[in-house]
Image (cartoon, helix red, strand yellow):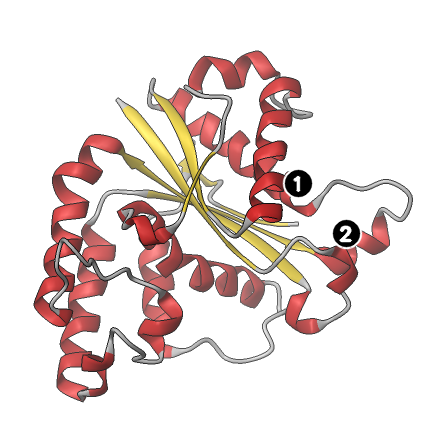
Amino acid sequence: MKYRMYVDEVGNPDLESSDNPLHRFLSLTGIIIDLNYISETVHPQMEKLKLNYFGSHPDDPIIFHRKELVNSQHPFGALRDTKIHTNFDKDLLNFLRNWEYTVISVCLDKKVHKETYQVWRYNPYHYCLALLLERFTFFLEQHTAMGDVMAESRGGKEDKQLKASFLKLWEEGTEYILPERFHSVLTSKQLKVKSKSNNISGLQIADLIAHPSRNEILNENNLLDRPLAPFTKKIIEILQGKYYQNNGRIFGKKFI
């Protein structure tokens, strides 16, 4: 079996913006899915959902973006109808509940990170990605499987940073994982970076749950500045059965 971990981020890696409450946290969320399952089950079902509610066409596919969905913005204007919105939410939640995937989410407090390590510090991307890859490695070993990693493109500079961090981890390992251990389960030393405009189902799932997962972690640490939204709570409830576990312990959530 081959798995792919699809990665989405919330926030940015800029430490200089860490004093701004709106930019204090960086989170990376990885969605681990079997590649055959993606092609045979997830992608067809996701496309049918888009067709049923928004008239998506293969030549011009609609791409799920959490922000536009939440605000019923184009191309999701049909959600302004209360009945359609209710039915869509129900169907989407059922898919998120029933699809087979595993979640790993890492959230970094950049402000504390900057204050703690004033002379030398990890790049925030590198720090979060290292933890994701460690747990992805544990998952692959546990399932006697191989895998690779794909992240959503954020633009030239940020894509280069993330690719460089991935390659550095491949070559040097981490405090807990020797590079040879990464090599034994990861099929590529290159991080795949794709735009969600490519209609990649895994990246769209990551986009839908990255923000709720990040807010759950902040809420658990009394760092969320507003109550959890009702729909976010429903996604968080689903995530409790999706977070990566090893020997009965949850390793799918990490706050740094």
Q: Is residue 251 visible?
A: yes
- Which quadrant holds residue 76? bottom left
Q: Is residue 241 visible?
A: no
On the image, the x and y values in percent for residue 157 come to 62, 47
In the rendered view, does 55 fall on the left or right side of 198? left
On the image, the x and y values in percent for residue 194 come to 40, 43
- Which quadrant holds residue 140? top left
Figure check: 142 above or below 17: above
Q: How far apart are marks 2 and 1 (CA)?
A: 10 Å
Figure check: 57 above or below 202: below
Callout 2, which amino acid?
His
On the image, the x and y values in percent for residue 217 come to 54, 59
Badge 2 marks a residue whose secondary structure is helix
Q: Mark 1 points at which residue?
A: 127
In the rendered view, does 117 fall on the left or right side of 152? right
Q: Residue at coordinates 62% horizontally, 33% vertically from top-left?
A: 164
Residue 225 tag number: none
Q: Name the residue under label 2.
A: 113
Figure check: 97 above or below 2: below
Residue in front for this viewpoint, 132 or 148? 148
Callout 1, which amino acid?
Tyr
